[in-house]
Image (tube, helix red, strand yellow):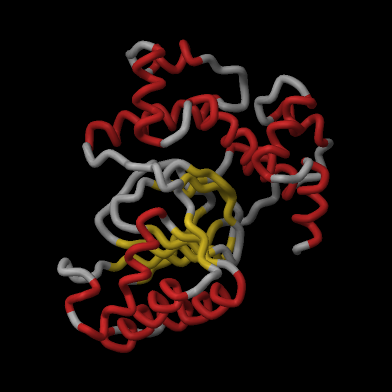
Amino acid sequence: MTSRARGEHYDFVWHYHAQFEIFHGLHGVGQWLIGDQTGTFAPGDLFVLGPRLPHAFYTPLSAAVTTTLPYDNQVVYFTLPASGASALPEFRSLIPFQQRVTRGLRCVGATADVVRARLLVLESQNGLRALLTLLDCLCLLGESDEVLPIATPSFLPSSVAASSERINAICHYLHRHYTRAISLQEVAEYAHTSVANLCRFFKQWTGQTVLEYLQGLRIGHACHRLTETDEPVTAIAYASGFTGISSFNRQFRAQRGLTPREFRLRSRGMR
């Protein structure tokens, strides 16, 4: 039911599975892609993913030049009865959880504090005690106002395995090259398709355009460097794949609601 994901880095693997998943950040900083949204994770972060929701937790390229320590995170996989939460009257309290988790959830505030503590207890339990602790966590996640949906309501992932392999290959390519100038034509040639087909397929699978996805990667890379290094903002902008400081500041504020300098000050003030 519960395990530890440990290592020096996480490879980018865009995937989905039939189980529910809880990702509990304990040690290390990285980036995530869940549905059609991207962001960064750090110790204390708590994510809950529904079945067949595409996702990846991975090490950004910038980690190679920082002092980020090895990863050690708790991951919980579980299933619920095929008949759903209505299998028993007592399980009806899980219905809100099942309705909310399809888009992925990020838990914050006091609820996250309680769930994190119970997940750590879960590691030393087995059998019925472990099941009761897990169900208690799920009830809290279904009832709390401190649980935020991640993927947009319009995100509808495909279930075709071939499509999953294809989008994974394209995302791998973007992750390897996003810190330099990259064109749609280049990506289309790599994927052995036309630009029009690439854009249509990518939008259908991720809910984002290729350029929106690239900007998200670059902003995530910049956030990591702003948090983990003392590099000048201008240097970070160019190292993240932006061609000018003005466009970097504009895109950063649009995605994070803060300027890069404000983001750096706030992230360090939270440590």
Which picture quadrant has residue 71?
bottom right
- Look at 65% across and 52% down and name the residue there: 68
Classify residue 227 as left or right of residue 33: right
Examine the rendered structure and indicate whether residue 4 appears above or below residue 212. below
Left or right, residue 224 beside residue 99: right
- Residue 211 position, x and y percent, is 53, 25
Q: Is residue 123 visible?
A: no
Q: Position of residue 251 (x, y in %)?
A: 69, 32
Query: Which residue does the image show at 65% across and 25% down from the upper left?
Result: 241
Going 58% across and 67% down the picture, which residue do you hit? Answer: 108
In this rendering, the answer to whether 118 lies above or below 57 is below
Q: How many marks?
A: 0
Q: Quadrant of the C terminus?
A: bottom right
- Asked if one can make out residue 27 in the rendered structure from this viewpoint, the answer is yes
- Picture layout, residue 49 above or below residue 89: above
Residue at the image position 38 percent from the left and 61 percent from the top? 101
Residue 10 or residue 97, whichever sits in front: 97
Image x and y of residue 58, in percent: 50, 46
From this view, report whether residue 250 is shown above or below residue 26.
above
Quadrant location of the N terminus? bottom left
What is the x, y in percent for residue 59?
Answer: 54, 45
